[in-house]
Amino acid sequence: MPPENRRIAETTFRVRFAETDQMQIVHHAAYIVYLEEGRSELGRQFGASYSVLEDAGFSLAVTEIQAKYLASARYDQRIAVRTWIEELRSRSLIYGYEIINAENRQVLVTGTSKHVCIDRQGQVRRIPEAWRQTLENHMILSTTI
């Protein structure tokens, strides 16, 4: 479940046939691809597109993925990936996720992924300040008094 003070990016799409098994149930590995789509969409919605980071010569290497499978998605089902930033540091970040049934909002999968910023030579680097600051400025929900 996402923290109450975090802004959540959400993207919705239909399960494709190629992502399912013979019973038309989503294969467990496909959910990891869905998490990647959630990260990409979060960057777009927060004004920090991942392609901008890549163009600057950096990438976010996945160092850990955790997924808890609660219910199955099926072929042609509309699902939504909900993504937020759990933690943002100078060289790393942690994303949080929920994959839900877009119709009834049932949670199908929860998870996290940890990433470290690297340059094109694979060396750990600080996340570029402008990109990190943009994420930081959008990750927390503003509160009105």
Image: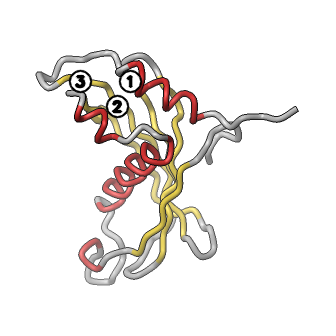
At which x and y percent is residue 31?
A: 36, 59
Name the amino acid type tagged 2.
His
**Label 1, label 2: how far apart the Cα atoms are:** 5 Å
What crowding class fits label 2: few (fewer than 14 Cα within 10 Å), some (14-19), or many (20 or more)?
A: some
What crowding class fits label 1: few (fewer than 14 Cα within 10 Å), some (14-19), or many (20 or more)?
A: many
In terms of image quadrants, where is residue 60?
top left
Decide if residue 95 is on the left or right side of residue 61: right
Q: Quadrant of the C terminus?
A: top right
Q: Which residue is mark 2?
A: 115
Name the amino acid type tagged 3.
Ile
**Label 3, label 1: how far apart the Cα atoms are:** 9 Å
Colouring method of the image: secondary structure
The numbered mark, 1 or 2, whose residue comes first in the sequence reads: 1
At x 38%, y 23%, the residue is 92
Name the amino acid type tagged 1.
Ser
The numbered mark, 3 or 1, whose residue comes first in the sequence reads: 1
The dot on residue 92 is 1
